[in-house]
Image (tube, helix red, strand yellow):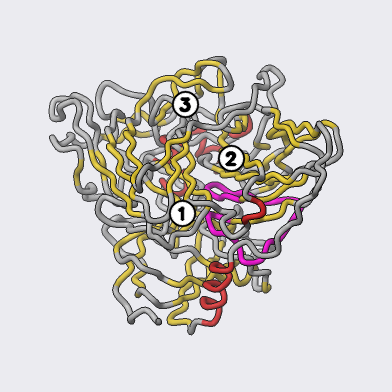
Amino acid sequence: MRGRGTFVAPLALAVLVCGAAAIALLAMKALPASAERAPAAQPIHVHGSAGYYRERAGMRGTAGLEDPNLPSTAYSEPHVISSHNGVLRVTFKPHVGSAIVNGQRVYGMTTFTGTYPGPTLKLRPGDTLRMKFVNQLNQDTNLHFHGFRTSPSGLADNVLRTIAPAVTTRTVQSGKSANIVVHIPKDHEHGLFWYHPHMHGLVDGQVYPGLAGLIIIGNVLEDLPYLKHVKQRVMALQSIQLNGNQLVNVNNAKVSQEVTLVNGHYQPTLTIHPGELQLWRVGNISNDFWYRLKFGGRPLYVISEDGNPVGHVWSAPKLLLPPGKRFEFLVRGPKAGKYTFDSARFNQGFSNFAPYTLANIVSKGPPVSKRLPIPKVASPAQRKIQRETLSDPVAKRRTLTFSIVHPFPKNLQGFKINGKLFNPHVVNEKVKLNTTEEWLLRNTSSEDHPFHIHTNDFLVMKVNGHNVGINGFQDVVRIPRKHNGKAGTVLIRMRYRTFTGKAVFHCHILFHEDNAMMGIIQFTKGPAKAQ
């Protein structure tokens, strides 16, 4: 039971009317003639609904819905756009319209190419992504490549860039476009990533109705050639609320009424042979849903986390997938029969996510004649970088405290890091390349926050003061909420590699991010890289 506010369906003028009670109006500045412009003098803060404020004041509910009236449809995966001769060329035109969702046309969707989710982009390390970006929305936007270890500046993965509308208005001629150019390093990690807008103040409402899709870089099984023929399933998880063939607007949507879709399908059916190994590549590209993956208690053998092949393969019966996170794991087909791939119950502190089925699994056909073994090491190279990072001297230790203001303010600006709201003109943390730091992430609020940082991934060292198994690098981690009045904590270690420039760190519950739970990090030149 949670109203959320940011993106509102197209209006005739650039004014956002936010909330059923219309608690505030935010006047937008006139748009310039070019397709790009510098950030506004003040942070863009869009007020949400009165309903969200009431829930913040004490109303909480169970999230997640299984809809008996929604038919299950056949499993399929998003259209793939691949690079050729080292270049991937694509045109994105974010716009409000309709898309096929679970086999029917749904109106009120917002997409890049008319599909939900967006197409899967497929590249190799060393490739270049060249995108023509035509903003057909009536508000500013941009594009982030979540998990990429690429430049955060210029035309690349620059979330501080503003791409203004390219629709015809008094000041903008139709057809203006922006270029996005991202060079993927030759030594970039192989794995699963994703893309979505990152225009501060508007992210929640642009991602929720469909502006998101997956990215695959390289071959996550490259160091495991005996597995090269295993069947791979690529699954994008998103959650939305429908009213017949109409998407419920983000300001009116309630988490308790949203359904989770796999590649835009409701509880699709997948098949597997008894004893067969399959690689399931699952990404949470929703705006604020948490998923706790399970396959009937069977082990999920993790090959990669957040686009990072792991050093040591590890397994668990359940995997927590906060917003933004990805896992790639092996599953083995059970004996012939019908099963389900589920999201188990999870209490985030504010939303209590109910258990529900993500997909139906049918194990059928003859058992495999030769059972492939589970690997022990997925990537020797990642294992080496992990060892080096753990042995690095710690150049600096920092503490970031995530907090929520009480009583919760009606303007919704109640999400802070180190007691501060996001300011696009302030660098919160300045770091040096080729150094390693430890950050203590503290959570003094009563709900979990998924921490995410751009450009450089991290190792999780401790949770609530206790050592944890270090399995590999990641870019999203849950900071547990306070317990018995004591802050939840996560200790992470990061080595800053390759790229200078400004990027951000934030809570990946996008409503929190939009309402100022974000900071800027600047990567500056440091000591020479060790040979």
Quarter-of-image position of residue 141: top left
Q: Earlier in the sequence, mark 1 or mark 3?
A: 1
Q: Earlier in the sequence, mark 1 or mark 2?
A: 1
Q: Provide the residue designation for mark 1.
A: 147
Q: Provide the residue designation for mark 3.
A: 249
Q: Secondary structure at mark 3?
A: loop
Quadrant the N terminus occupies: top right
Q: As shown in the figure, which amino acid type bears the numbered disc 3?
A: Asn
**Magenta stretch contains residue 317:** yes
- The region drawn magenta spans 305-327
Q: Residue 85 in the image: x percent, y percent?
A: 35, 45
Q: Secondary structure at mark 2?
A: strand
Q: As shown in the figure, which amino acid type bears the numbered disc 1?
A: Gly
Q: Which mark is residue 131?
A: none
Up/down of 252 relative to 195, above or below = above
Neighbour class for label 3 at 10 Å: few (<14), some, many (≥20)? many
Which dot, 2 or 3, sits closer to the camera?
2
Q: Secondary structure at mark 1?
A: loop
Up/down of 530 relative to 478, above or below = below
Up/down of 512 relative to 463, above or below = above
Quarter-of-image position of residue 166: top left
Give the residue displayed 51% in from the left and 66% down from the top: 458
Question: What's the CA distance linking mark 1 and mark 2?
Answer: 17 Å
Q: Earlier in the sequence, mark 2 or mark 3?
A: 2
**Magenta stretch contains residue 446:** no
Neighbour class for label 2 at 10 Å: few (<14), some, many (≥20)? some
Which dot, 1 or 3, sits closer to the camera?
1
Q: Residue 230 in the image: x percent, y percent?
A: 66, 45
Q: Provide the residue designation for mark 2.
A: 234
